[in-house]
Amino acid sequence: MSQTAYSLEHNIAYAGMQADSGIDYDVSRTAEGVIGFGLGAVAGTDAEEQVRLPLFETSSVTYGSDFGASNVISFTVNGVSISPVTYASSHAATLTALVAAVNGLTGVTATNPSGRVVKVVVSGVDNVSTTSVAGGSAVTSAVVTSSSDVVRGISVAILNQTTGNYTDTNIVTVKRRGAIWVQTDGSGVTVDGSVYIDTDGKFTDSTTDSLAVSGASYVKYDSTTELALVEINIP
C-alpha cells in the first residue's frame, strides 16, 4: 500500500540526530577526550583543531558575613582538604590565612578578588570546592562554579549509530548551524528559553554551574526520552 501521509519533521529518535532537512553547517574537529553524541562541545587545547567537553575550573566562594571569634573554617578542593583555619585577630587576617591555605594545595590557585569572596582555580579538571564554618557565630557560604570555555557547537551522531561516543583523537562532526536532538540533564527545558550546558556537556535551563550557548534556542522537549530539539546558529 502506498504512503499517503507525510510528516514535515522527523520523529524523536536519538541524541546527535539531525532533526530536519534545513540548512546545516558542520565542521570536523579532533576529539580531546571522550565526547558523547548530542552534547555541547567547546574549543580544546588547540582551539582551531580540537573540541572537548566543557571544564568548570573556577569556583567563587562567597561567605555571608565576616569571620568572628572561635570560627574554624574548613575548605576542600576536589576532595583534598586544607588544615582548618581558626579565626585569628580579625576577619581580614583570617581570610588572608584561608586564601594562603587553599593556595597551598597542589594545582590550585586561590585569591581574594573582593569582599568575602575566595576565588579558586584549578587547571585541566572540573573544580568541586566545598567549605564550612564551625564554632562561634554562624557564617553561611555559597559556591558558584564557572567556565571560561567557548562553545563551538554540538556533536553529531556517527552515521548509522544511534548510541555511542567519539573516543579521544577521533574526528568529531560538530554542528554549528541547524536543528539537532541533544541530551539534557533530565530536569526539562523551556521552549524558546535560554540555552545552557552543564559540566557533562548536557543541555539545561539551569544558570548554576553551567555555560551559556549563544545563538541557540530550544524548539521542543520530549520528557520520555529527555531529549531536546535545539536550533543553533554559530557563524
Image: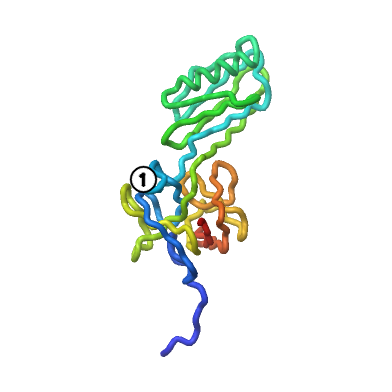
Tell which of 177 and 104 is nearer to you: 177
Q: Mark 1 points at which residue?
A: 32
Using the image, determine if residue 178 lies above or below residue 101.
below
Going 48% across and 25% down the picture, which residue do you hit?
109
95 lies left or right of 165: right
Can residue 11 be seen by looking at this rendering?
A: no
**x%, y% of residue 126?**
46, 37
**x%, y% of residue 49?**
37, 48
Using the image, determine if residue 112 lies above or below residue 26.
above
Picture mark count: 1
**x%, y% of residue 135?**
62, 17
Colouring scheme applied when the structure was drawn: rainbow
| The image quarter in which residue 145 lies | top right
- Residue sitting farthest toward the bottom: 1
Q: Is mark 1 on a helix, strand or loop?
A: loop
Tell which of 26 and 135 is nearer to you: 26
For badge 1, the amino acid type reads Glu
- Residue sitting farthest toward the top: 89
Going 38% across and 57% down the picture, which residue do you hit?
173
**x%, y% of residue 115?**
65, 24
Using the image, determine if residue 109 lies above or below residue 9.
above
Going 58% across and 36% down the picture, which residue do you hit?
144
Question: Crowding near pointer 1: few (<14 within 10 Å), some, many (20+)?
Answer: many
